[in-house]
Amino acid sequence: MGENLSQPFTDSAMSKDEKIQMEQEKRVQITAFAFMIFITILAFIAVASEAIPYGFAVPFILLLAMVQFFLQMFYFMHLKDKDHGWPNAMMVSGIFLSAPTVISLTILLGEVKF
């Protein structure tokens, strides 16, 4: 069973089009990852820099967090791909159900200080 393991494997089961598509997907994944690192660095700069006022830094960081969340959902969770209708529906319904719950509990507990 393992007698061919020492021989090099030159042929792939993927076609040339599948290889090109995999390379393109890898490039998109790396680009999305680099963009998310850039967003994280922007958030750290917004906090570390005293030039940015607190009233602007908090909404800016929350906006960056939302952008990063959606990028991670679509690129790293592969929700942009075909045949992901049900996972997309469940994620969206979970967001629409949990967001008002978290907001209302935050208001109820008095943690929002504007």
Image (tube, rainbow, N blue to C red):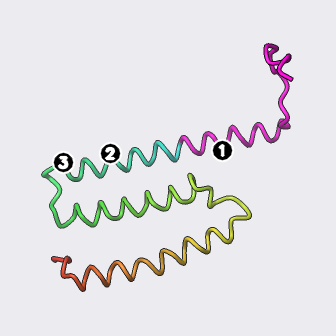
- Residue 75 in percent (x, y) is at 57, 53
Q: Which segment did they paint magenta?
A: 1-30
- 65 displayed left or right of 13: left
Q: Any mark on residue 48, and which?
A: 3
* Residue pointed to by mark 2: 41
Q: Is residue 83 above or below residue 18?
A: below
Q: Quadrant of the N terminus?
A: top right
Q: Residue at x 30, y 82 (%)?
A: 105
Would residue 7 be counted in the magenta stretch? yes
Q: CA distance from mark 2 to mark 3?
A: 10 Å
**Mark 2: few/some/many CA within 10 Å (<14, 14-19, 20+):** few
Element type at marker 2? helix
Outermost residue toward the left? 50
Q: Is residue 103 above or below residue 38?
A: below
Of the numbered discs 3 and 1, the one sitting upstream in the chain is 1
Q: Residue at x 80, y 16 (%)?
A: 8
Element type at marker 3? helix
- Residue 68 in percent (x, y) is at 43, 57
Q: Amino acid at mark 1?
A: Glu
Q: Any mark on residue 25, and which?
A: 1
- Residue 6 in percent (x, y) is at 79, 13
Q: Is residue 108 above or below residue 61?
A: below
Q: Residue at x 74, y 43 (%)?
A: 21
Q: Residue at x 69, y 37 (%)?
A: 23
**Mark 3: few/some/many CA within 10 Å (<14, 14-19, 20+):** few
Q: CA distance from mark 2 to mark 1?
A: 24 Å
- 11 displayed left or right of 57: right
